[in-house]
Amino acid sequence: MATFAPKIAVVGSGISGAVCASSLARNGVFVTLYESARGPGGRMSRRRETTEDGKELFFDHGAAYFTVTDPDVLSIVQEWESGGLVAEWKENFGTFDRISNKFVCIEKEIPSKKYVGFQA
């Protein structure tokens, strides 16, 4: 008797689709990930624009970073980190005070590690 290997399509390669696909693949499911944009990441993705003089500019679109509180998702994100797909994000949020001409850090203490994705 032949062994049945399930095949699953995941639509969207944002953070939820990526976690879903990783979790399924980790459990032996054949996954095909579909994405309509030119690259993965959804609202966590990087955009590229070219200036009139041909210089390429890169900027993050949407969320600057993400955090993880679920232990199962954390294990997947740690695999991504080991593979170079994500890294710890160590930047701070703040504002620039025009009167004092100084950067004012406004970030509250965030208990969990912050991650940022890299384009593969």
Image: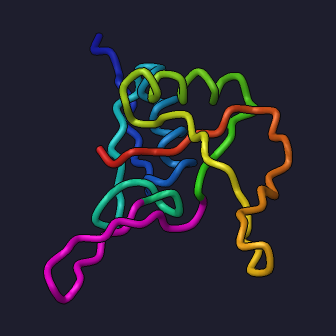
Q: Residue at x 47, y 43 (%)?
A: 18
Residues drawn in magenta:
46-63
Quarter of the image for the N terminus: give it: top left
The answer to whether 23 is drawn above or below residue 47 in the figure is above
Task: Residue at 42%, 27% (x, y): give it.
Answer: 25
Between 36 and 83, the one nearer to me in the picture: 83
Provide residue 27's location: percent of width, then percent of height: 48, 20
On whether residue 53 falls in the magenta region, the answer is yes
Q: Quadrant of residue 7?
A: top left
Residue 118 as seen in the image, left or right of residue 20: left
- Please give the count of numbered marks on the rendered protein: 0
Q: In this view of the protein, which residue sits in the foreground, 73 or 51?
A: 51
- Image quadrant where residue 56 sits: bottom left
Instruction: Tell me: 30 left or right of 116.
Output: left
Check the image and name the residue furthest to the left: 54
Point out residue 48 in the picture as x, y percentages from the top left corner. 30, 70
Q: Is residue 43 left or right of residue 28?
A: right
- Extreme residue in the bottom direction: 52
Residue drawn where x is 57% and y is 41% of the image: 89
Vertical position of residue 3 compared to residue 30: above or below: above
Up the image or down, 46 lies above or below 98; here it is above
User: Where is residue 57 shown, x and y percent of the image?
Assistant: 30, 70
Q: Which coloring applies here?
A: rainbow
Picture quarter containing residue 62? bottom right
- The residue positioned 46% from the left and 38% from the top of the image is 21
